[in-house]
Amino acid sequence: MATELKPVYLIVGGDRPKIQRAIRRLRDRIGDESTELLSAFDATGDDAVAACNSPVLFGSGQRLVVVADVDRWKAADAKSVAAYLGAPAPDTVLALVGEETKKSTSLAKACAKAGEILVYDVAKRRLPEWVAKQLADRGVESDPEACRLLVEIVGEDPEALAAEVDKLATWALGGARIGVTEVEQLAAGCAEIPGYELTDAWGRRDVHGALGACQTLLERSPDPASRAVPGLVGLLVGHVGRVRSVQALVEEGVSAREIASRLKRHPFYVEKLVAQARNYTVDELRDAVVRLAALDHAVKGGSRLAVDLELERALIAITRVRDAAAA
């Protein structure tokens, strides 16, 4: 027997595939024809309350109002919803979806009092285990190293990982086991999240490829350049820093396998870093860090130029061969 639905559910966390399944279960209970989907990007707390109080014209008599991105709401929006939850509309379920809404907020406290808070999250360090479970739920066996490599290639976005898991599970329908080889051959990196096309092009000193990847990442990003560019700067800073660390260890005579063990990274990924380190001198990597620091200052208001232009100029400077720069 199905449990009685609460007047409100606050659904939070970074495990978006699980959040989507929770919303799907609510929609299946109430019916798509009686569901209204809103987003806090353009719907206020008053809008959500008005939707909840609207009469149901079709369907079962119950109503589901789903509001995504409630992390964007201000105090006034939370206050409106909290007031509504003091006397919620009968036969109406309000589902509020946010990624980082804390239980200490007034909105969360009101939801906990009137309904239920559902937390679907996954620690980044446990993402390989999460991948393994997703594959197991689809009846597919996998190697731990393969699951770790999938996270390296795709990134830490559970939604992007779930898409790759679906692809791998479809390939393994005949009972095949997913290993490192299968992941290397079948998994496609999510360009929007880890930016491997960009860092790979930088690593092989391909200026044209790096600029092209940079442009693609900016075009695919849902954020404006003012927010997307600082993210790419952070990506480059982290990657160049790892290459410098690997370069120093190689000069000490440490093997790639031992480096992988020390950094707790897959050997496949570390071998790539080693190859990139060989393409740059110690001075070049040091100068690249300095140039990226200057870029970080520029995109945070230290320059009058457009942030994407500053990024492209820095990318050229840290990628091109020194002889070409001198010429």
Image (cartoon, grey):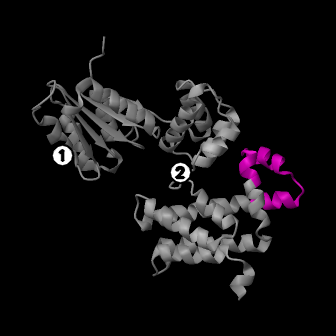
Residues 3 and 162: in front is 162
Q: Is residue 74 above or below residue 86?
A: below
Q: Locate residue 242 relative to residue 217 in the image: left or right.
A: right
State how many labels appear.
Answer: 2
Q: How far across and down, in percent of the image, does residue 174 sit?
A: 59, 26
Residues 121 and 150: in front is 150
Secondary structure beneath label 2: loop
Mark 1: few/some/many CA within 10 Å (<14, 14-19, 20+): some
Q: How far across and down, in percent of the image, does residue 85 sit?
A: 21, 33
Residues 119 and 68: in front is 68
Q: Locate residue 163 relative to residue 266 in the image: left or right.
A: left
Q: Which mark is residue 47?
A: 1
State yes or no: residue 259 in magenta.
Answer: yes
Dividing the picture into quarters, in which one does residue 323 lie? bottom right
Q: Residue at x 54, y 68 (%)?
A: 212
Q: Residue at x 60, y 36 (%)?
A: 126
Residue mark closest to the camera, 2 vs 1: 2
Q: CA gap, disc 2 to disc 1?
A: 35 Å
Q: Which residues are magenta?
A: 245-271
Name, please, the residue furthest toward the front: 174
Q: Residue at x 59, y 44 (%)?
A: 187
Secondary structure beneath label 1: helix
Q: Locate residue 308 relative to residue 115 in the image: left or right.
A: right
For disc 2, the marked residue is 190
Q: Main secondary structure of the magenta part?
A: helix
Q: How far across and down, in percent of the image, does residue 319 sit?
A: 66, 73
> Would you say the residues marked 2 and 1 are in contact, meaning their CB atoms lie under 8 Å apart?
no
